[in-house]
Amino acid sequence: MSSFFYSGQIRRFLQQFIRVLNNFEVDLGKNREGFRTLLRVPIYYGDSSRQVATIIARNSENSMPSVPAMSVYVSGFKYDRPRLQEPNFVSKLQVRQRAYDPVTGEFTSYQGDLLTVERLMPVPYLLTLKVDIWTSNTDQKLQLLEQIAVLFNPSLELQNSDSYVDWTSLSYITLIDSEFTNRSVPIGTEEPIDVATLTFELPVWLSPPAKVKRQGVIHKILASVYDASGTIDQENNTFDIAASLFATRKIYTPIDLNVVYLGNTLALYVNESDIEFDDGSIPPMRPGDWTVAIRSFGELSGQGNVDLLTNGLSQVRLENDGNTVVGTVAYHPTDVNLLIYNVDTDTMPINTLSPVTAIIDPKTITVDSNLLNPVYGTRYLILNPIGHYDNDDGDPATLDGAPVWNRIGQPQLIANANDIIEWDGTKWSVSFDSQITITIEYVTNLTTGVQYKWKNNQWSKSVEGRYGVGAWSFVPN
Amino acid sequence: MQHSMISARSSIYRLTGNVPLDIFAVAIHTLQITLDLVISNISYSSGQIFVDFRGFCVIHTNMLLCYVGFVNLQSINTRYIYKDPSVPRLSLWKDGKHTNDYKFFDRRISEIFTISGTGILVHKYLGPIDQGESDDVTRPSYTTQSELNIQDLLFLENRDRKYEENVYRMRGIYQVTDNAFDLTQFGLFLQTGTLFMTFHINDMTNILGRKIMNGDVLELQHLIDYETLDPNLPAALKRFFVVSDCTRAAEGYSPTWWPHLWRCKINPLVDSQEYKDILNRIQVSDEDPTPIADILSTYQQYVDINDAVVLQSETEIPESGYDTSGIYHRSFDSETPDFAVRGYLSGSAVPPNGLPSTAGISFPDNPEIGQYHLRTDYLPNRLFRFDGNRWTKISDDERTNITSNSADNKTLRNSFITNDKTFRDVRGNTQPEKQNLNDILKPKADN
């Protein structure tokens, strides 16, 4: 295991410093044609190796150094104890990245990695830089100094990276000293080149490498996995570890997202609140966009910019009172709020009751031969009550109640709304008593083929409806 | 040896006697070749040869050492030489006049330069280039081009120098020394690059019209470098020096006490403002119009180095602040999130997740819900998102290129520095916004 690390932190500060002093120009005055020339003054690192300097000079004595020029070099680098902070402090940052497409070399609009970045307290240093300005005359020097001097009032910010997680990237340059010329006046017989020197100070931080991990943050508690006794609650099989498919398939259980299964579509809704009560109430929601939601699930490893949803192959699983309804999905051609949902009928809940012939409203139903002469075993789920005890006059020879539901000599049919009545060949009787049934029951309407579920004292479509947070999942393929 | 020559007296000497003919032949030949005019008479009588010549001679053991010019006639044995007592003593100083002796020496010295001097091309300094009319009297405008003109009377310097287009050929002599490179913060300099070169004064003034002066540029032809490291250079590298000081050379005084030599201190030329008139005007060859500055100077290489460093720095940090473009903004209800990362200098004109946006100085008609729009009339530009009822602010484009003086640097300071904007004054004249404080209230011409 290598302990080596190097990210060029000081090098990058030097590069940025050179950038600050880049693009300064001097006015060379008019040439013989009367044209004025602005000459850009190059700035470069002043402590070059002799070999590179020779190469630049093309290994010839005849090469001419160019003036004006600026050079920058490090003249000091010392630990800055006054800026010392808790050395053992570790800062953690949670980052959600956009997916990166290695083919295009750009970020996609999909979600990428979820990262936790741990940063150890950086070490403070004081970096001193000197800038030498070589000019061939006084006017040049004043031109340059005037332009550079107004940059620092008193300081100028400097970064060595633009990384959002790099808390050491920001520093500032302060001009702390300046020397107008390296020559003495009077100049005497010597002819040294005229160099002005500016001294700058940068308080910098040096960072050791950070720890980057897959994000382990719990964004939202969807449900308690423990019961009152502190043991894992597997009653609803929601957290059936044994049945988990994590080992073989990647399943996304989005947070904040609800789907409403209706007909052959899945509509997406987003919770408007981070709080959801488990009293069965429906939280405030607003329509969502499936393309965005799918994109937020991220990317498959190594397959950047590839949509996770494959029409007709990707699945949505609906957790329904212990049953898992599985169906394939496809994008709706016109509505981003909808997915077309093709349920695998084998995964539908098993009927616990015999199917009903139809669902009827006894108050408004048209009486015809089907009612008057029903086939044996005809079953109806009724939406309103039939009969009443007050209709019974005690005489078995008379008809009590409506003739369509009653027969002379037979007990009056008294049924409540949501009951299922059945014709046994001689009379109608209650087959399913909604008043006393508390278990979950499933029944199919033979007329429409729709399965219904009896739960919480009401009938509803067995799998259609809202699936809240944690009650549905997406399987890419 | 030089001292002996000065202290010796000039006399007429006679080479005579029963000298073997071969010795005479050598002597006469030597004298004729090197001292043609020194020999005043050659005669032959009674088997003897008489050769009268003039020179500075001293007796040294059995040799007569004569110096005429710089030639040592050691080959002539003193046995055959005697001093003619009939010739009167000579005086080489003639009341400040340039005597024939002076001319004699001067021609000899000139000849020596012709024989042994190296070829020098002189770029003659003509004076500063006229910078035009100025209201600054310390920077006068001269009506005539002259070496006497001074460009800047405050700093006492001539920055924009004009050189004659004609190049003068001269001969000079200097002591070749070994050089070593001094590595400085600005590259390599020749540690002992300063040379002291002597010129013949009369030849110099005849050719140049004046003495060589500070600022004249010399090209030493024999120092041209044909073997540089860069094989792609279109021409060999010439060697230029600039004159920094000139005085009469101590060794250039003849016995007449008149000076004959002009000694100049010359330094290697640097590519600076002062010599642009030479370096930018001379082509590398008749076929190639490239100025020699482009191949002699290290300027472009350092600019390229500078550019590479800045390019890398701009690649690493294209703009100030922090790049949040790689951060994913989670939003489930719309494809266009209605928020952006907040932080110091992290605002951007690019919508969250890199989604597309429109831009303009007003909001578009009939926007779609979730549409982003960048208002470019805001400073900094502001990114909005339409939520169905209103345009909500997402972020301000706070980040900017921070390369100094670059065109897309939108910092406050740079808005003052790289400001090309103009305005119309009350007279309808276009005026630049960028003006120096000391000039703003000065009267300006109406045209």
Image (spheres, grey):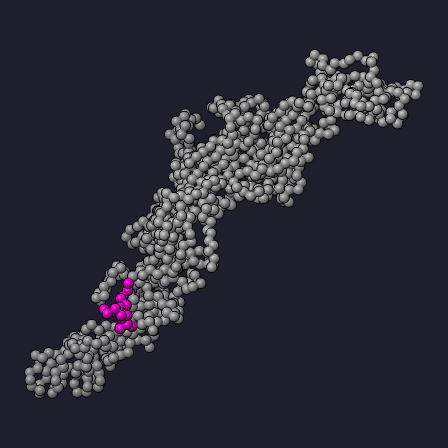
Q: Is residue A401 magenta?
A: no
Compare residues B403 and B132 and report the one nearer the observer. B403
Seen at 87% across and 25% down, the residue is B24
Tally of marks: 0
* Dominant secondary structure (helix, strand or loop) of the stretch shown in magenta: loop
Give x and y (percent) for residue B326.
40, 54
Is residue B110 toward the left or the right of residue A323 in the image?
right
Seen at 35% across and 52% down, the residue is A89
As drawn, the residue found furthest toward the right would be B46
Part of the protein shown in magenta: A221-237
As drawn, the residue found furthest toward the front would be B61
- Is B61 situated above or below B430? above
- Is A369 situated above or below A214? below
Residue B367 visible in the snapshot? no
> Which quadrant holds residue A419?
bottom left
Is residue B151 toward the left or the right of residue A308 in the image?
right
Is residue A338 toward the left or the right of residue B258 in the image?
left
Seen at 35% across and 66% down, the residue is A252
Can you say which quadrant of the picture contains the C terminus of chain A?
Answer: bottom left
